């Protein structure tokens, strides 16, 4: 039987703020919180994703394009809450 994972500790209010003001540092911190380590975060951030048109989350995070940064945060949030699509 699979163990149930508790979502990360960032509050909903803080997540809302992050989505309104996304940046590379926020994305990295949230990813580390969700993945649980710098190594796993780095691995995920450097993996091209179909949902990002085969770009990496790292490319989106560093783009300075708030829409792309927001999209990356949304994906991290979905992973955190176990919503895979």
Image (cartoon, helix red, strand yellow):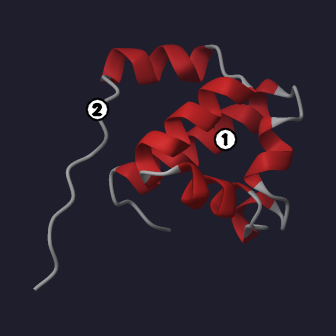
Q: Are marks 2 and 1 in contact (CB under 8 Å)?
A: no
Does residue 13 appear to the left or right of 7 in the view shown? Answer: right
Residue 7 lies, in percent from the top left, at 27, 45
The image's mark for residue 71 is 1
Residue 52 found in image quarter: bottom right
Identify whether 33 is placed above or below 4: above
- The circle on residue 9 is 2
- Residue 67 is drawn in which quadrant? top right
65 over 74 or under it: above or below: above
Q: Where is residue 85 in the image (x, y as percent from the top left)?
A: 50, 68
Q: Which residue is drawn at 87% across and 26% down?
A: 64
* Tag 1 secondary structure: helix
Position of 85 compared to 21: left or right?
A: left
Secondary structure under badge 2?
loop
As drawn, the residue found furthest toward the left would be 1
Of tags 2 and 1, which is closer to the observer? 2
| Image side of residue 66 versus residue 72, left or right | right
| As drawn, 53 above or below 14 | below
* Residue at 84% across, 68% down: 54
| Distance CA(mark 2)–CA(mark 1) | 20 Å
Q: Residue at the location (66% across, 43% down)?
A: 72
The disc at residue 11 is none
Quadrant of the image containing the N terminus: bottom left
**Residue 11 image offset from top left, x and y in percent:** 30, 23
Q: Position of residue 55 (x, y in %)?
A: 85, 60
Going from N to C along the chain, the mark reached first, 2 or 1, is: 2
Q: How crowded is mark 1: few (under 14 residues within 10 Å), some or many (20 or more)?
A: some
């Amino acid at each position: 039987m699979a163990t149930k994972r508790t979502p990360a500790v960032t509050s909903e209010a803080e997540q809302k703020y992050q989505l309104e003001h996304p940046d590379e540092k926020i994305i990295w911190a949230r990813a580390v919180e969700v993945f649980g380590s710098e190594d796993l975060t780095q691995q995920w951030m450097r993996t091209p994703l179909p949902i990002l048109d085969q770009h990496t989350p790292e490319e989106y995070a560093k783009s300075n394009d708030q829409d792309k940064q927001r999209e990356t945060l949304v994906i991290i949030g979905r992973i955190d809450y176990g919503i895979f699509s």
